[in-house]
Image: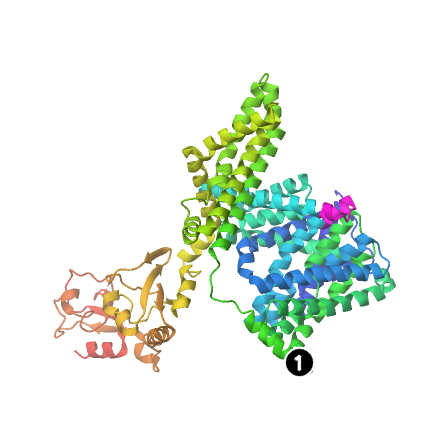
Amino acid sequence: MNELAPLIADLALILICAGVMTLVFKKLKQPLVLGYIVAGFIAGPHFALTPSVVDSASVHVWSEIGVIFLLFALGLEFSFKKIMKAGGPAIITTLVIIFGMIVLGYLVGSAFGWSKMDALFLGGMICMSSTTIIYKAFEDLGLSKKRFTGLVMSVLILEDILAVVLMVVLSTVAVSSNFEGGELVRSIGKLAFFLVLWLVVGIYLVPLFLRKARDLMNDETLLVVSLGLCFLMVVVAAKTGFSAAFGAFIMGSILAETLEAEHIEKLVKPVKDLFGAIFFVSVGMMVDPAMIAQYWLPILIITLTVIIGQPLFAMGGVLLSGQPLKTAVQSGFSLSQIGEFSFIIATLGVSLGVTSDFLYPIVVAVSVVTIFLTPYMIRLAEPAYAAINKALPQKVSAFLEDYSQASAPSATKDSAWKMYLGEIARMTIINGIIALAICIIGFGVLHPLAVEWIPGIWANVVTAVVLLAVMSPFLRAVAVKKSRGSKVFDALWESDRANHAPLFASMVIRYAIAIGFTFYVLARLFHFSVILILLLAMVLGVFMFFNKWTKRSYKRLEQTFITNLTSREKRAEYLGEKKPEYASRLLDKDLHLVSYDIPPEVEWSGKELRELNFGKRFGVHVVSILRGKRRINIPKATDRLFPHDQIQVIGTDKDLEAFGSALQKCQGELPEDFSASEMVLRRMNIGEGSPFLGRTLPESGIRNHYHCLVAGIEKPDGTLLVPSASLPFEQGDVLWVVGEHADLDTLLAL
C-alpha cells in the first residue's frame, strides 16, 4: 500500500481539529477565529497529547495562500467610492487611531528593550481592530441599527484599506532597514503610482473583458477566471516589489466595480473560508505556552495598551470630528481589540525575517484576550458614558456640545474654485501617471526591440512616434481638458475678472507639464540642442493637443472607463436596489423618493394610473415602475400597475405617509372564517327533469352563473370524460363539480 504524503496527513489533522473546534466555539457562541487558533495549537508542535503537523513548511505556504484569499475577498467587498461616502468623522477617527496606536506600540516595544523592527511591527499589529468580531458583536447585541455603529463600520472599512498600505510601507522599511523620511516618501510615492496605474488600467480592461466573455461564463469558468486574475496581480505586485496580499487586494477592488462582483464574491467565499481557516490554524500552531508564560508581563501590558489606548484614541478622533460625547464613548469602547490584520502583519514580519520569535505568540495571546472582552467592552459603553458625563466639568460638557453643533455639515455647496482645482488635480495626476507608465514601458521594452530590429536612427524615430502617439490622448487631457468650454472654467472666468490671471496660469502650468513629457521623450532619443528639442516639443504639442483624433480617442477611453466604474451603481439604480442620485437633492425641497411594493391582493393591481389618480388623491407622483428586470421611467397615464411591481414615488413626508396608509388598507385582511372559502368536490346527476339536460357546458352557465367548475363527466358505463364545450349533457350522466359550499348548494338545489 502506498504511503500517504505528509501534506495530506497534515491537512487531514488540521481540518479535523478545525472542524471540531468550530463546532465547540459555535456552541459556546464565541468567534470562530478563536476556534481556529485553538485548533492550530492542538495540531501544533507545542501540544503533546495529539499528533502534530509534520510538513510545517507546506502548511506555511498554504497559509500564505489563505492571506491572499482573505485580502482578495476584502477587496471584493470594498469600493473606492466607499471612502468618499465614509465622511470626515470616519476618516479623522481612523487616522487618529492608526497613528496614535503605532506611536504608542513603538514606545511600549522600545520600553521593553526590543529592537526597532519589533517595536515598529508591534505598533502596526495593535492599530487595527477586528471587523468580523465587531460586526458579529453588534448583531448579537442587537446594536446594528444604532447611530454609532455606522460610524464604527466606516472606521473599520478605512482601517482595512490603510492596513494594506501599512503592510506595503512595513515591507519596504523592513527590506531596506531604513527609517529615513526620504525612504518612506519614496515608498509611498511608488505605492501611489502603482495603485493609481493598476486601478485605472484594471477598471478599464477587466470589466471590458468580462463583458465580452459573458456568454462563455458559467460558475466554474467565472471562478477560475477570477482566481486567475487574482494570482496574476499577485505575481505582478511581487515583481514590482510589493506583497502578494497587496496584489490580491487590488484585483479584488477592481473586480468589485464589475457587474459580476456579487456573483464572484459568492463563488470565492467557500475557497476563502477553507484557506482562511488554514491560515488561522497556522497562527495557532505558532503559539508556545512556554513563551507565553515567559512573556506574561509584556502580554499583560500590551493587552492593557490595546484595551485603554484604542478606546481613548477612538474617542479623541470622534470628538475631534465633531460628534457627540455619547457617540464617541460608544465608538471607542467598540474598537477595543485587535484581530485578523494583526495576524497578517505578524506573519509578514516572520516571512521577512525581521521580527523576533517571541512577538508572534505575544500578539496572538493579546488578540485572544481582547476578542473575548469585546462584548463586555461594548456593554460597558453606556455606564462609562454616564460616569464620564457626570465627572466632566460643566464648562467642558458645554464646550463639547457647542463644538459638535458647530461641526455639523452645512448646506452650503463647495465653491467653484474648489471644484475646479479638484477636477484638474485628479485629471492631471491620473493622466500623468498613465503617461509616465507608457514612457517606462516604451523605454524598457519597445526601444530595445526597435534597436534590435530597425537600423540606425530610425529605431529612435519609430520609438518616438509610437510613444507620442500612444501618450497624446492623455497629454491632451492634461493640457487642455477643463479649459475654455467647460462649465466650471467658464463660470469662474465670467464671474470675476480677478479670476482670469489664475485661470490662465493654471492653463500654462498644465500645458508645460504636457510639453515636459514630450520634451523628455525627445531628449532621451535624440541628441540635439536643448532649445531645438524644446521648440520641436512645443510644435508637436500644438499638433497633438489640438488634433481631433486625440480628442476623440481620449473621449472614447474616458467614456468606457466611467461606464465601467459606474455600471454596478447604475444597475442597482435600474433595479431599484439603490436610490437615484437626484433623490438626495429632493431633501433640500422637503421631498422624498420612496419605493413601495405592490402586493398581489391590492385593489390597485391591474388599474391604469389615470384611474388611480395618486396626484390628486394623495399629492404624490409615480416616477418609475420596476417590473422584474424592466424599468418604466416617467410612466404614462395609461400604464397599469401589476402585482409585484415596485413603484418609486415622490412626495412630502405627510403625503407619503397618507399614500402608504392607503396602500396598506387596500391589501385587505384574511377572513375570520376560512371554511366559507373551502373548495369541495360533489356529484350532480343529470336526470330526466334536470334543467341542464341537453345543454352544452357553456349553455349550462355552471361556471359563469354558479361559480362552479365541471371537473369530469362520468357516463352510465363508468367512463370518465374530460368536459367538452361542444358535447351536450345526456340523461344518466354524472357531473363531478368543484366549488365553494354555498355555490354548490345553490347549484345542486336546482
**178 sits left or right of 273 in the view:** right
Q: Amino acid at mark 1?
A: Pro
Q: Give yes or no for residue 539 being in the magenta stretch.
A: no
Q: Residue at x 20, y 76 (%)?
A: 747
Which quadrant holds residue 284?
A: bottom right
**426 sits left or right of 400 in the view:** left
* Callout 1 crowding tier (Cα within 10 Å): few <14, some 14–19, many ≥20: few
**Which residue is situated farthest in the top direction here?**
455
Which percent across, then down, holds residue 372? 71, 69
Which percent across, then down, holds residue 340? 68, 59
**Image quadrant where one finds the N terminus:** top right
Q: Residue at x 63, y 30 (%)?
A: 444
Which percent across, then down, holds residue 403? 59, 72
Which quadrant holds residue 239?
A: top right
Main SS of residues in magenta: helix
Q: Give yes or no for residue 180 being in the magenta stretch.
A: yes
Q: Secondary structure at mark 1?
A: helix
**Pointer 1 residue:** 383
Q: Which residues are magenta?
A: 170-184
Which quadrant holds residue 3?
A: top right
Q: Is residue 383 above or below residue 645?
A: below
Evaluate whether residue 14 shows in this view: no
Which of the pair 145/664 is nearer the observer? 145
Which of the pair 76/204 is nearer the observer? 204
